[in-house]
Image: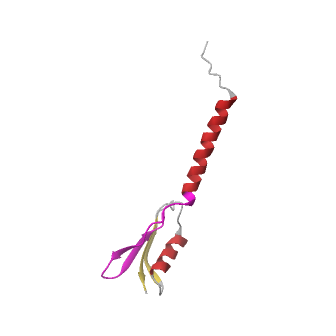
Amino acid sequence: MPFLFIVNESFYMKYILILSVIFVIGCAQLMNGQIQPVTLKDAKNKVWFTTCSGASEDWYSCNQKAIKTCQNGYYALDKYENANGGIRELTFKCN
């Protein structure tokens, strides 16, 4: 006769509670992801670089970082996005 594992209702409640906490922590991490910095890629030509990768950033946040870096506007030298949209990179120069 096979061994039957009988579990009471409190076990399932604890299991559901633990999974719920893990889910909420994961969602909170996505909402408050780390913003990637803007770095000076080429000091001589004053070319800047930033990434907006992952679920917490998008092209809008990339553009906002460029606007904040360049008070008189900017123009993009290169924009890269991989096929699934997980990696976004912006290389730009101030006006």
Tell me if residue 33 is in the magenta stretch.
yes
Name, please, the residue furthest toward the right: 9
**Vertical placement of 8 versus 30: above or below?**
above
Looking at the rendered image, the quarter that the N terminus falls into is: top right
Tell me if residue 6 is in the magenta stretch.
no
**Vertical placement of 65 versus 1: above or below?**
below
On screen, residue 25 versus residue 12, left or right, reads left
Q: Nearer the viewer, residue 60 or 33?
A: 33
Q: Residue at x 67, y 35 (%)?
A: 13
Q: Give x and y (percent) for residue 57.
A: 52, 65
Q: Give x and y (percent) for residue 21.
A: 60, 45
Q: Nearer the viewer, residue 64 or 14?
A: 14
On screen, residue 18 versus residue 75, left or right, reads right
On screen, residue 29 versus residue 20, left or right, reads left
**Vertical placement of 72 versus 32: above or below?**
below
Looking at the rendered image, the quarter that the C terminus falls into is: bottom left
**Vertical placement of 17 versus 86: above or below?**
above
Q: Give x and y (percent) for residue 80.
A: 45, 69
Question: Which residues make up the magenta segment?
Answer: 30-53
Q: Give x and y (percent) for residue 71.
A: 47, 85
